[in-house]
Amino acid sequence: MQEELELIFPTEEYKKEIIDFKEEFKKNNETIIHGGAGLEKDISFEEWLKNVREDLEEETSRKRNRVPSAVYLAFRKSDRRLIGIVQIRYKLNEHLFNYTGHIGDSIRPSERNKGYSTTMIGLALEKAKEQGIGNVLMTCKNYNVASARTIIKNGGVMENEVEKDGIIYQRYWITLKKSYADGRNKSNDILESTFKNLRIDNNEFKGNISLLKINKVRKEWKVDVESRCVLAKDYMWLRIYPDGENYCITAIFDDKDNIIEWYFDISRSLGIEDGVPYQDDLYLDVVVVPDGRIHILDEDELEEAYNKREISKDEYDMAFSVANMIINGLESREDIERLIKFSENYLTILKNS
């Protein structure tokens, strides 16, 4: 059984363990400790720790020609042995975007081939998500099958291969913005719910439509200046996933089956896992209310993701293109009425299925 690890930020307290960790790489004739923020260099522990702390902040990391990042030590819980080290880079420059990615990591030589790398990367992804990184880039050399396997186990999907100095690098993206129709990762405020999904294939619609019935909440959600409630006990979220599109729709109904709003999530892609639809979120959203008002949300998040190289220029442009298509398709009152009729019809179908 795989023993548990925990990630801890390095401090003076762990000097002995870190030096011992470094020495093991040296004895194994390894000159690089990936993810170690220069731990393999011939500098003192104190200087290394000072550099690690400075790299946490953008201003101080920039003075060292670095991007802001955090280094974590992976300790085995059972015996407090230092198993690995991992670095999470909060931003990517040109070189990191092409060849290195957001995360670098190393497992000490004596603890390899035990599954620890997969566990450590999983914990690092949780840290990345806490920092608001929505899409994580990881890379490996094309002959490093073990690293590729670790990345794929953590959800990595290879985008392409690039060459530098005769070496082929594989570039994988891991999305941390995947949202499931059953609400599993939507909010901790949904305490109890029921879920069902139907595959629809007719002249009107092709895709998946699901219904999430909210049975118990920790707290209600209210949005905008009108304090419009979108999450409460006995509310229903009708979630619509059309085939071949880069968006999904959540039609929110209150406890009396009145439509509150439609929330259009612009998506990199749609899919289904174990019968549950999901969307790979692309930050930008469009909200439509029954009186016809339309709002575009999270443009700042999309802009930030692009500036941090979490999304490509093509994805950035696509998000706005899809949003404009949605808005243009809802210009008239007749368009809104059709959306109301469609949503109410499939709410009835899902409730009775």
Image (spheres, rainbow, N blue to C red):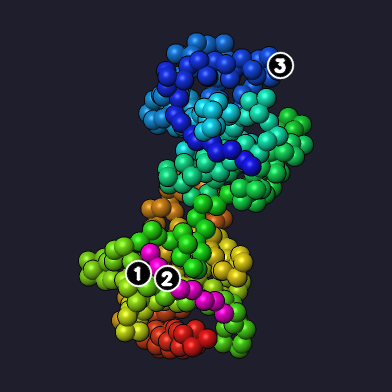
Closest to the observer: 97 or 329? 97
Q: Specify the quadrant of the image occupied by residue 27.
A: top right
- Residue depth check, mark 3 versus mark 1: number of the one nearer the observer: 1
The residue sitting at 53% across, 32% down in the picture is 78
Percent position of residue 257, x then y: 35, 84
Percent position of residue 58, x then y: 40, 31
Percent position of residue 31, x then y: 66, 18
- Looking at the rendering, in which quadrant would you find the N terminus? top right
- Tell me the CA gap for discs 1 and 2: 7 Å
Q: Specify the quadrant of the image occupied by residue 162.
A: top right
What amino acid type should be assigned to the residue bearing mark 3?
A: Asn
Q: Earlier in the sequence, mark 1 or mark 2?
A: 2
The residue sitting at 55% across, 38% down in the picture is 4
**Tag 3 residue:** 29
Q: Is residue 288 above or below residue 305?
A: below
Callout 3: SS: loop
The residue sitting at 46% across, 65% down in the picture is 183
- Tell me the CA gap for discs 3 and 2: 55 Å
Q: In the visual, does 254 lie left or right of 61?
A: left
Callout 2: SS: strand
Region rendered in magenta = 191-198
Residue 216: mark in rendering: 1
Closest to the observer: 56 or 307? 56
Percent position of residue 98, x then y: 62, 39
Q: Main secondary structure of the magenta part?
A: strand
**Tag 2 residue:** 193
The 10 Å Cα crowd at callout 3, few under 14, some 14 to 19, many 20 or more, is few
Would you say residue 282 sits in the magenta stretch? no
Disc 1 + disc 2, Cβ < 8 Å: yes
The 10 Å Cα crowd at callout 2, few under 14, some 14 to 19, many 20 or more, is some
What amino acid type should be assigned to the residue bearing mark 2?
A: Ser
